[in-house]
Amino acid sequence: AKKWKTGFHHIARQAGVPIVLAVADYRKKQLTFPIILEPTEDIEADMQKLYEGFAEAIPRRPERLSEPVKILWEAKSHRGQKPSGPKAIEVNVTLAWRLTKRASVAL
């Protein structure tokens, strides 16, 4: 896609809940939660943070990245890199625990 839809951002902002970014890195075989974003009125800046979060990982199919993420991903010199090993992904338990701890504190 050339541009992401932003309905999720509007819903999260109006509901007063954070947007939790989940990123699968197929090279490291990890699922991480690198960003917990409190949505602001500046949608463009928030979207840029989300794009950057996705650009850090090696996706399963780099050719299918959305245009905003692909530009950042290629700028980070990931071009030509492909995932290795089996398709299974391990969850980074430490980050999942931190996310749960933060969510329970916010309640």
Image: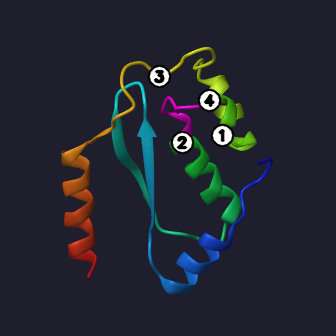
Q: Amino acid at mark 4?
A: Pro
Can you tell which of label 3 and label 2 is closer to the viewer?
A: 3
Q: Is residue 12 left or right of residue 32?
A: right
Quadrant where the C terminus sits is bottom left
Question: Which type of secondary structure does the marked residue at label 4 adopt?
Answer: helix
Magenta residues span 54-62
Q: Of marks 1 and 4, which one's residue comes earlier in the chain?
A: 4
In this rendering, is residue 100 above or below 93? below
As rendered, which of 40 and 80 lies closer to the eye? 80
- Please name the residue shown 28% across and 77% down the image: 106
Q: Number of callouts in the render?
A: 4
Q: Which residue is mark 4?
A: 62
Q: Residues within 10 Å of mark 1 (few under 14, many from 20)?
A: many
**Residue 70 location, x and y as percent?**
68, 34
| Mark 4 vs 2: CB contact within 8 A | no
State the residue position of label 1. Answer: 69
Disc 3 to disc 4, C-alpha distance: 9 Å
Residue 14 vertical placement versus 106 (above, below): below
Numbered mark located on residue 54 in the image: 2
- Residue type, numbered disc 3: Pro
Could you tell me which secondary element the residue under label 3 belongs to?
loop
Say whether disc 1 or disc 2 marks the residue closer to the N-terminus: 2
